[in-house]
Image (tube, rainbow, N blue to C red):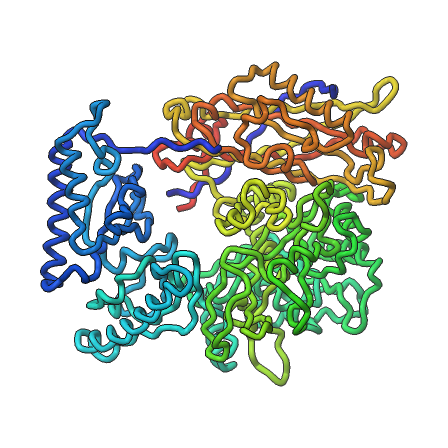
C-alpha cells in the first residue's frame, strides 16, 4: 500500500467561553458465493490433488506416518474461519497464519487419514442448509479461496523480509510445535537427529556444497513452542519430511552482534567500507541528534558521514570535545544508523536522514557537581543551537543520577522541563532521556531477581521530567549462539523488560506523577548461567561504533541497556522530524507515543486489571516508526497544532477561559457504509508545561504544572450541547476536588465508553493517549473532540503573573480499520482540499 503523509488540519477548533462548573468484535467477512456447488467442487478437487501429490511422494505412508501440511487461502480482503480449520478430536492443528498480499493464509497440519474432516465439511456446504437457510459451514468453506499442498515457504511468517533466494544460506529461526517441559524434550531431540539424517539424504540429492544443516545448541522454550536456530539454504530443507513434521514457523534469525565484534579488525574495516559505499549523506537542511555525553570520536569512518569536528563541542571550553570514555561514540553509532547488524546484513542504499552533534557534558577527570546538571544540560543545548541556529534538533541524554526523588521533581528534571517548554526564550525543544539502569546485575550474590529487582528500582533523575520523552528498555533478543556460553540462557523473555531497565512501580498507587517511562525501545538482553551469574553477552546486545585507540584498530563494539534504547528513540525522533520539518516538538513527541503499543508479552504480564502497573513499567509501549511517519488509505492520522488561553482574570479571582471544540473532517459517509465493521480511534494530546518544582506540599496551590489540558470525544448518542455540558461538569468536579480526573467516579454513561485506559489513567503528566475500538456506525457520530483546561499554578498563584499565558498543544487523531477496501484517507483528504504526497 502507498505511504501517505499525515493530514494537517487547520480551522477545526471552535473557541468557546469556558467556565468550570470491550472491545467491539468484528463481523466475519465472508466473500459472496453465487454458486456454492461449483465452489465446493473446486475445493474438493484441490483437496484430492493434495492427497494425490502426497501419495506420489510417499507411497508407503501408514497411520504412524507424518502429517500433511495444507495451505488454506482466503479471498483477498476477506477472512478465513481459522478456528474452524482446527479440530482437537482428529489432532488437526493450525500451525501458522500469515498474510500473502491482502489474503490470509493458514497452514494446517492434517494427520494421516484425517483429510476426511475437510471433505465432509465441503460436502455439507454443498448439499445442506442451516435452519436460517444458509449453506452449512458457510463461513468455513465459503471463506476458502483455494487449497494447496504446503511447501517450506509456507512456514515463512516474516512480514517484511522476503523468503531467502535459492542457494542463500542464512540463520533460520525455527519454531517447533513443542510443549514446555519434559514432554517436549523428545521432540527437540528427535528434530536434532532428523536434521543429521536430512544432511545424509541431501548430500545424495544436492551434492556436498548444499548439504549442511547446522543447528545451534541453544533452545528457547515457550508454552507451546520451542525455538532454535539452523544455518542452511532453502534447498537443504528438501526431501526431509521428518524434519518439518513438528515445524510451526520459520523466521529470519536476528543477526547477533557477537560475530562482528569478535572478527578481526581488517574484516571490520572491510564491512565499514562496504557500508560507506552505499551510504548517502543527509541533506544540508536535515535535523540533528545532539548527543549530551562523553564526547564523540568524529573521525570514526562511519560517524564521519554524519558529524564533523565543527559539530563536536564541550560544555566547558577547557575540555577537549573528543570522547574520553567511549560511551558517547557508542551512542552516536546507534543515533545515526540504528543497530549496525541490520545495515551490515542488508545490501540496499542507506540514506541518512539527520546529522549528529555532540556536546561533551562529562569531564575527562573527576565529576561535575551534581546540583549543576540542570544548568549543564541547558547550556549544552544552547551551545549547539548557537552554532547551528536554523537546524531542527532532538537532544539525547543518557546520563542519569540516582533514584532518590521517586517521581518528585528535582532541579535537574525541572530544568529540563523549563528548557523544553521555552519558558526562558519561547523556544520549545524535544529531549530524550534514559530511564536509568539497574546497576548491580554483575555483582555476584547481589540478589538480583528478574523482573522483581527492576520493579523495585525506580526511574533515575532526571527521567521524571514531564516534558522530556523518558525511554525505558525492552528486548526481543533471546538467541545465544556463542559457543563459550553453553548452558547460559537469556534473562528476559522475548517482548519483555530489558534486565537493566528501571520502572516507576515504586512511586506508589496514589502518586500524581506521570507514568514513566513514556516508551520503551530495544535495549538488548543479559544472560544467566545455572550458578546465578548474570552478564551481558554480545549475541544479545546491539552493534555500534567503537571509539578508536592507537593500540587497537577495531571499529565495532556491542552496546545495550537504556542508553542504547534512548539513542534509538532519539534517532526515530529525528527521522520523523526529517519528514515533517515544520511540526512542533510537542507533535513529534506525540507521534512517538501515538504510534506505540504493548507487545503481547507485556499485555500478558499486566492484564487489564493491572493497566496502571503496565504503564508504570512500559509506558505506552514500543513506538512504530512506520505508523509515526505514514498514513494509509485505511489508517489515517490527523494533526492539529494550536493554542488556547486556559485562564483569565475575573472580578475576584483567576478563572478558566477557553475551551476548544474540534469539528474534524470526519469520514462519516464512508463509515456508515460499513456500520458493523470494527474500527479503532486513537487520540493523543501533547503539550509542554512550565514547572514549579518547589516542594511546598504539592497542594492545589502549589501544583508542579503550570496548567493542564484534557481531551474528550463526543459520544455517539450525545448532542453537541450535551457534549459541552459534560465537559464543563467534569472539569468542575476536578477543580472542586483538587485532584486529577482519575479520582472522579465516572458516570454510568462514561463506564460504557470503550476506552482502553479511560480518564482514570490517561490524564497524568503532559501527554495523554488513549484509544477505543468499536463499530463504524458508532465512530461516524464521534467527529467532535473537546480540549479544555484544568487547574495549574498559572491560575492558583496569580501573583506570578502567568495567568494570561496561551498554552500550545498538539492533537493527534488516528482512525484505522483492518479492511483495505475502506478508504478513510481520501474521504478526509477531499474535505481538507489537500493533495497528498505519496511515497511508494
On-image quarter of the N terminus: top left
Give the total number of marks visible in the rendering.
0
Relative horizontal placement of residue 836, taking residue 534 as reference (left or right): left
Answer left or right for 210 relative to 481.
Answer: left
Determine the residue located farthest toward the bottom in the rendered image. 551
Residue 311 seen anywhere in this rendered image of the structure = no
Is residue 362 visible in the rendered image? The answer is: yes
245 to 832, vertically: above or below: below
Where does residue 732 sit, x and y in percent of width and height? 73, 22
Residue 288 picture location, percent across and down: 62, 55
List the single residue furthest toward the right.
799
Q: Where residue 765 sits in the image (x, y, percent)?
A: 70, 40
Q: Quadrant of residue 645?
A: top right
- Residue 193 occupies quadrant: bottom left
Residue drawn at x 43%, y 39% is 632
Residue sitting nearer the eye, 627 or 322? 627
Question: 149 or 794, which is in the foreground?
Answer: 149
What residue is shown at x 61% (from left), y 54% (from top)?
570
375 relative to 828, above or below: below
Give left or right: position of 579 versus 461. Answer: left
Residue positioned 39% across, 73% down in the render: 216
Residue 560 higher or lower than 496, as above or below: below
Place residue 473 in its image quadrant: bottom right
In this view, the residue in front, 543 or 448, is: 448
Amino acid at each position: 500500500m502507498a505511504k501517505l503523509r499525515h493530514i494537517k488540519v487547520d480551522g477545526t477548533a471552535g473557541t468557546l467561553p469556558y467556565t468550570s462548573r470491550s472491545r467491539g468484535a468484528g463481523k466475519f467477512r465472508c466473500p459472496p458465493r453465487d454458486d456454492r456447488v461449483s465452489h465446493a467442487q473446486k475445493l474438493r478437487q484441490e483437496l484430492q490433488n493434495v492427497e494425490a501429490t502426497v501419495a506420489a511422494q510417499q507411497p508407503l505412508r501408514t497411520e504412524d506416518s507424518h502429517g500433511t501440511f495444507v495451505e488454506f487461502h482466503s479471498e483477498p480482503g476477506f477472512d478465513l474461519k481459522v478456528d474452524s480449520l482446527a479440530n482437537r478430536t482428529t489432532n488437526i492443528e493450525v500451525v501458522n497464519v500469515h498474510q500473502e498480499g491482502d489474503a490470509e493464509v493458514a497452514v494446517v497440519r492434517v494427520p494421516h487419514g484425517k483429510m476426511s474432516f475437510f471433505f465432509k465439511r465441503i460436502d455439507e456446504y454443498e448439499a445442506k442448509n442451516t435452519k436460517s437457510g444458509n449453506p452449512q459451514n458457510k463461513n468455513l468453506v465459503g471463506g476458502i479461496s483455494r487449497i494447496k499442498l504446503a511447501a517450506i515457504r509456507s512456514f515463512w511468517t516474516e512480514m517484511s523480509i522476503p523468503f531467502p533466494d535459492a542457494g542463500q544460506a542464512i540463520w533460520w529461526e525455527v519454531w517447533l510445535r513443542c510443549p514446555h517441559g519434559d514432554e517436549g524434550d523428545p521432540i527437540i531431540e528427535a528434530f536434532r537427529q532428523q536434521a543429521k539424517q536430512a544432511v545424509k539424504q541431501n548430500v545424495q540429492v544436492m551434492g556436498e556444497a548444499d548439504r549442511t544443516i547446522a543447528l545451534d545448541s541453544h533452545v528457547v522454550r515457550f508454552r507451546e513452542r520451542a525455538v532454535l536456530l539452523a544455518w542452511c539454504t532453502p534447498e537443504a530443507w528438501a526431501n526431509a519430511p521428518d524434519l518439518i513434521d513438528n515445524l510451526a514457523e520459520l523466521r529470519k534469525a536476528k543477526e547477533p552482534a557477537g560475530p562482528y565484534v569478535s572478527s578481526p579488525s581488517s574484516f571490520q574495516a572491510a564491512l565499514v567500507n562496504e557500508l560507506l559505499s552505499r551510504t548517502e549523506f543527509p541533506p544540508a537542511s536535515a535535523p540533528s541528534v545532539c548527543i549530551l555525553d562523553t564526547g564523540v570520536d568524529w573521525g570514526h569512518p562511519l560517524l564521519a558521514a554524519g558529524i564533523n569536528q565543527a559539530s563536536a563541542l564541550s560544555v566547558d571550553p577547557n575540555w577537549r570535545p573528543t570522547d574520553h570514555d567511549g560511551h558517547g561514540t557508542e551512542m552516536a553509532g546507534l543515533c545515526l544508523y540504528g543497530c549496525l547488524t541490520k545495515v551490515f546484513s542488508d545490501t540496499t542504499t542507506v540514506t541518512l536522514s539527520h546529522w549528529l552533534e555532540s556536546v561533551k557534558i562529562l569531564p575527562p577527570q573527576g565529576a561535575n557537581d551534581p546540583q549543576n546538571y540542570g544548568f549543564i544540560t541547558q547550556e549544552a543545548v544552547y551551545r549547539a543551537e548557537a552554532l547551528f541556529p536554523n537546524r531542527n534538533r532532538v537532544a539525547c541524554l543518557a546520563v542519569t543520577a540516582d533514584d532518590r526523588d521517586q517521581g518528585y521533581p528535582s532541579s535537574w528534571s525541572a530544568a529540563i522541563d523549563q528548557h523544553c517548554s521555552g519558558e526562558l526564550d519561547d523556544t520549545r525543544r524535544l529531549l530524550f532521556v534514559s530511564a536509568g539502569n539497574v546497576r548491580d546485575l554483575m555483582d555476584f550474590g547481589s540478589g538480583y531477581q528478574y523482573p522483581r529487582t527492576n520493579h523495585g528500582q525506580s526511574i533515575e533523575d532526571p527521567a521524571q521530567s514531564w516534558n522530556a520523552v523518558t525511554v525505558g528498555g525492552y528486548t526481543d533478543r533471546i538467541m545465544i549462539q556463542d559457543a563459550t556460553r553453553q548452558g547460559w540462557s537469556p534473562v528476559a523473555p522475548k517482548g519483555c523488560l530489558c534486565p537493566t531497565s528501571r520502572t516507576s512501580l515504586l512511586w506508589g498507587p496514589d502518586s500524581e506523577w506521570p507514568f514513566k517511562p513514556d516508551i520503551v525501545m530495544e535495549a538488548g538482553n543479559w544472560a544467566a548461567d545455572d550458578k546465578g551469574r548474570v552478564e551481558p553477552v554480545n549475541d544479545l546486545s546491539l552493534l555500534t561504533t567503537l571509539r578508536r585507540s592507537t593500540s587497537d584498530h577495531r571499529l565495532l563494539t556491542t552496546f545495550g541497556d537504556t542508553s542504547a534504547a534512548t539513542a534509538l528513540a532519539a534517532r526515530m525522533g529525528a527521522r520523523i522530524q526529517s519528514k515533517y520539518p515544520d511540526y512542533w516538538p510537542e507533535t513529534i513527541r506525540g507521534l512517538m507515543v501515538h504510534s506505540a503499543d504493548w507487545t503481547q508479552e507485556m499485555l500478558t504480564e499486566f492484564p487489564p486489571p493491572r493497566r496502571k502497573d503496565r504503564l508504570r513499567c512500559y509506558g505506552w509501549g514500543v513506538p512504530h516508526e512506520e505508523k509515526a511517519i505514514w498514513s494509509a488509505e485505511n489508517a489515517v492520522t490527523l494533526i492539529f497544532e494550536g493554542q488556547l488561553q486556559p485562564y483569565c482574570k475575573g472580578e475576584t479571582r483567576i478563572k478558566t477561559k477557553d475551551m476548544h471544540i474540534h469539528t474534524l473532517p470526519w469520514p462519516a459517509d464512508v463509515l456508515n457504509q460499513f456500520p458493523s465493521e470494527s474500527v479503532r480511534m486513537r487520540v493523543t494530546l501533547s503539550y509542554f508545561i512550565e514547572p514549579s518544582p518547589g516542594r511546598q506540599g504539592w497542594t492545589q496551590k502549589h501544583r508542579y504544572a503550570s496548567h493542564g489540558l484534557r481531551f474528550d470525544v463526543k459520544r455517539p448518542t450525545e448532542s453537541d450541547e450535551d457534549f459541552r455540558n459534560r465537559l464543563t461538569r467534569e472539569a468542575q468536579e476536578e477543580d472542586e476536588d483538587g485532584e486529577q480526573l482519575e479520582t472522579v467516579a465516572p458516570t454510568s454513561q462514561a463506564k460504557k465508553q470503550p476506552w482502553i485506559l479511560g480518564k482514570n489513567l490517561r490524564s497524568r503528566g503532559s501527554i495523554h493517549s488513549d484509544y477505543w475500538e468499536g463499530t463504524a456506525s458508532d465512530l461516524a457520530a464521534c467527529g467532535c473532540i473537546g480540549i479544555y483546561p484544568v487547574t495549574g499554578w498559572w491560575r492558583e498563584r496569580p501573583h506570578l503573573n502567568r495567568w494570561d499565558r496561551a498554552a500550545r498543544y498538539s492533537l493527534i487523531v488516528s482512525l484505522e480499520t483492518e479492511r483495505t477496501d475502506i478508504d478513510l484517507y481520501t474521504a478526509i483528504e477531499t474535505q481538507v482540499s489537500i493533495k497528498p504526497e505519496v511515497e511508494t
